[in-house]
Amino acid sequence: MRTRFSRGLAAALAVSALSLTAACGGGSDDKAGSAEKGAEGTGKTSAAPAATPLTAAQMKAGVLELKDLPSGWKASKAEPDTTVYKADNEACKPIATLMDDKVAGATIGGSVDFERGNSESLLSQQVMTFPGTGAADYATAIGTALGTCKGFSAEMEGMKMKITVEKLTAPQGTEQAHAFRIKMNIADLGMNVESNMLVAAQGTGLTRFAHVPADAAGHKDFDGFAKLAAEKFAKAAQG
């Protein structure tokens, strides 16, 4: 997840709690090789996951570029977020972990952020690589959590928040993909924020993608953005 405190409190909280963290932009060293190709299809993992990590070039190639988006979007820069989100519901812990800046065991490469207007709508994506079956394991944990987690309470910078989770239809084309919507209520500020999320795995690679719409009507755009992100990531991860 990421923060944008310089863009105003409302935008900062929306992105901090619900978008992907720009600190993921800490680059990785080049590693030889590329991910092996696996059977495509949401929810399916490769019978023999690639053991070779993605290269830095693959991870960079796996994130969206401004030219991939409709007109009106512009590149932006997010600030690091050191918040650690802890769920009070055991079944929801993988979802809370997804909101953290860092991902245990992962080397994070490509990282991008975009906004439309004055941060009314936001997009964020990171691509990372894991040793062994780490990417598939991470995505599987998210999928398992989505089967049982309907919501949880958490804390951000001393403020209590209630988070509800709604499973969505994920795009096809990767070995594993999970999409969901997070709705967050921050009673201390009287704020309600919603974000659409995608987690997809291919070989040793994984992408996190977040879409924060300007309003409820903007949720309709998520399917198109998620499809673009998944397709570009899969192509890069497959070499």
Image: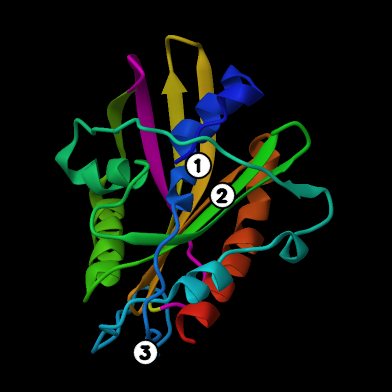
Observer-side mark, 1 or 3, equals 3
Question: Marks 2 and 1, Cα distance to the nearest angstrom?
Answer: 6 Å
Magenta highlight on residue 165: yes
Q: Residues within 10 Å of mark 1 (few under 14, many from 20)?
A: many
Location of residue 228 in the rendering, given as x and y in whole percent from the top left corner: 63, 68
* Residue drawn at x 43%, y 50% as measured from the top left: 24
Mark sitting on residue 138 = none
The numbered mark, 1 or 3, whose residue comes first in the sequence reads 1
Per the rendering, the mark at residue 124 is 2
Pinpoint residue 147: horizontal percent, then vertical percent: 27, 55
- The tag on residue 19 is 1
Residue at 37% across / 77% down in the picture? Answer: 31
First along the sequence among labels 3 and 2: 3
Residue annotated with mark 3: 36
Mark 1 belongs to which amino acid? Ser
Compared to residue 89, the image places residue 143 above or below, namely below
| Circle 1 SS class | loop
Name the quarter where the N terminus is drawn: top left
Q: Disc 2, disc 1: CB below 8 Å?
A: yes
- Looking at the rendered structure, the kind of residue marked 3 is Glu
Q: Residues within 10 Å of mark 2 (few under 14, many from 20)?
A: many
| Depicted 154 relative to depicted 176: above or below | above
Quadrant assignment, res 231: bottom right
In this picture, which residue range is highlighted in magenta?
156-174
- Estimate the x, y position of residue 235 in percent, counting from the top left: 54, 81
Amino acid found under the numbered disc labelled 2 = Ser
Q: Residue furthest front?
A: 29
Find the distance from the CA under tag 1 to the CA under tag 3. Answer: 29 Å
